[in-house]
Amino acid sequence: MSAILNGIAFGFLYIADACPGGTDIVNNYISRKKKKPVGNISIIVNTVLMLITWAMSYAIKTPTPNPSFATHYFSTPFFAAFMVIIICGIVSNKVFPRYRNISLLIISDKPEVIIARLKENGFAHNALWKVTTNYNGEYKDNAHMVMITIPPTMFKRIAETILLADNEAIIRAQTTFKIKHMPHNDN
């Protein structure tokens, strides 16, 4: 439970563009440079630090008799600490979804108006397809589908923009895992 609350607190701190200090300064810096979710970076950095610290404590500590490294350190406290790191990172990613994207599929009879409004908001990269049938198999005469990829934090503003342009538009959202651009041939 404390890992979940900790992840929520870190997520809110990241939303406010604040940092609690410690390794989170490093996590935030790496996240911004690599454009990766801060929770994922936190999991990696904190796990590496935990392993280094525990390996150093084993090297320095000389108990009598000397237990094996695996028996002494890969135990319940080690597993619990590792789970706290993972849960905290996952929850902070859910609360603060920077560098994640969603793709919006917008079905509309007014694609030109929607594309113009999206360009006004700085979203010029989109795709447009003609839609011939809907989900019920009914023929559609002038409907088009516009696809755009945005951060989840912008969904509300973009959805309002789209619905102001066409209040009958259908908006579908799906998680986008990776965005790759096709190579362009300038010849």
Image (cartoon, rainbow, N blue to C red):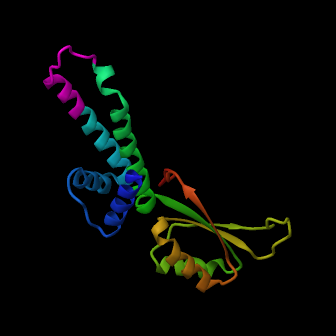
Magenta run includes residue 59: yes
Query: Quick one: which residue is furthest to the front in this view?
Result: 64
Choose between 98 and 58: the one closer to the eye: 58
Q: Residue at x 86, y 69 (%)?
A: 138
Tell me the quarter of the picture where residue 6 sits: bottom left
**Residue 30 at x, y percent in the picture:** 28, 51
Query: Quick one: which residue is furthest to the top in this view?
Result: 65
Q: Residue at x 15, y 24 (%)?
A: 61
Vertical comparison of 159 with 2: above or below: below
Q: Is 168 positioned to the left or the right of 153 in the image? A: right
Residue 57 visible? The answer is: yes
**Residue 17 at x, y percent in the picture:** 29, 67
Q: Residue at x 29, y 23 (%)?
A: 72
Magenta run includes residue 186: no
Vertical comparison of 171 with 54: above or below: below
Magenta residue span = 53-68
**Residue 145 at x, y percent in the picture:** 67, 69
Q: Is 1 positioned to the left or the right of 103 in the image? A: left
Choose between 105 and 78: the one closer to the eye: 78
